[in-house]
Image (tube, rainbow, N blue to C red):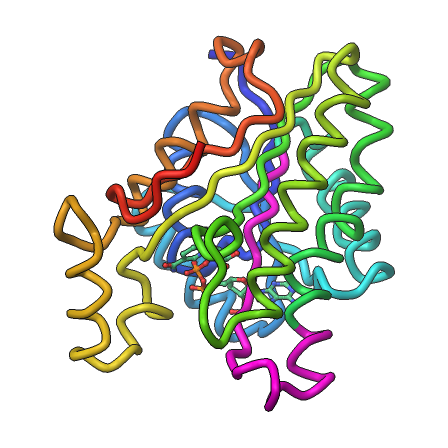
Amino acid sequence: MTQRIALVTGGTGGIGTAIVRYLARQGHKVATNYRDEAKAQAWRARMADDGIEVCMVPGDVADPESSAAMVRAIEAQCGPIDILINNAGITRDATFHRMTYQQWIDVINTNLNACFNVTRPIIEGMRARKWGRIVQISSINGQKGQYGQANYAAAKAGMHGFTISLAQENAKFGITVNTVSPGYVATDMVMAVPEEVREKIVAQIPIGRLGKPEEIAHAVAFFTTDEASWITGANLAINGGHYMGW
Ligand code: NDP
């Protein structure tokens, strides 16, 4: 397999860590961003214990200037980015009639506007080099909606609109753009939900359990291969059968 340079935003999180590990084990050079230096160093040390060296640069994906600086720093340290996984994300849940503008805009900025902020400084280089793989990490709740998540569902649905437009614009430049929409995965975010609520979620999942971060990483990595070069504009649901859309 050709060694590529991959940026996984939010690589220190539950799903992000699994994606970083997967791509690194496939032989790629992997980079991610951090916001908290101490947390980043501890994470990097854990990865190094497993023999995985990760290029880490500061970056806030909700901020266009910070994102552009992050991309410049990664490309200066590692080289041009071939694979981009727009994975960083947050939730700020509230029913819409109680939602504050801050909850709305924080979620839109971090999940959706981040796709502009991070992809924009990378896409021209991919087009010039005629190869690229871009994967958005959306969510089941962007496909089916979710009580208390109008902000998150709007952002996550918007990410797939971004995917299918970018896929059309860049197909002839050897760039594929796809979305992965995970269902409920056993990360800190989901394990923090009270057990009785989690049990109710699991009861709605035909496969009868939460997903594993590695199961999401496996699908993301598939989209980044040379062999997946005819797959673009897809939205792959990985949710244990929780939501079966067309
Ligand atoms: P985590 O909360 O574990 O990780 C989120 C990551 O994003 C962290 O590394 C975090 O960094 C980073 N991040 C958050 N905000 C910013 C920002 N403004 N700038 C840069 N980095 C930022 O989440 P998960 O791993 O569970 O989720 C990963 C993705 O998968 C998200 O997009 C999420 O919406 C999506 N998803 C998750 C599901 C689940 O069940 N867990 C289900 C469906 C989708 P920091 O440590 O600095 O906060």
Residue drawn where x is 54% and y is 19% of the image:
3
Residue drawn where x is 76% and y is 22% of the image:
168
Res 101 quadrant in image: bottom right
Res 107 quadrant in image: bottom right
The residue closer to the viewer here, 171 or 205, is: 205
- Where is 217 relative to 176, above or below? below
The residue closer to the viewer here, 48 or 163, is: 163
- Where is 49 relative to 164, above or below? below
The picture places residue 77, in percent across and down from the top left corner, at 71, 41
Count up the numbered dots.
0
Left/right placement of residue 122 relative to residue 246 reads right
Residue drawn where x is 81% and y is 46% of the image:
72
Q: Is residue 175 magenta?
A: no
Left/right placement of residue 103 relative to residue 141 reads right
Q: Is residue 94 magenta?
A: yes
Residue drawn where x is 37% and y is 70% of the image:
189
- Where is 3 relative to 210, above or below? above
Left/right placement of residue 121 relative to residue 99 reads right
The picture places residue 157, in percent across and down from the top left corner, at 60, 50
The picture places residue 190, in percent across and down from the top left corner, at 32, 68
Query: Which quarter of the rendering shows the C terminus?
Result: top left
The picture places residue 163, in percent across and down from the top left corner, at 67, 35
Magenta region: 84-106
- Where is 200 relative to 209, above or below? below
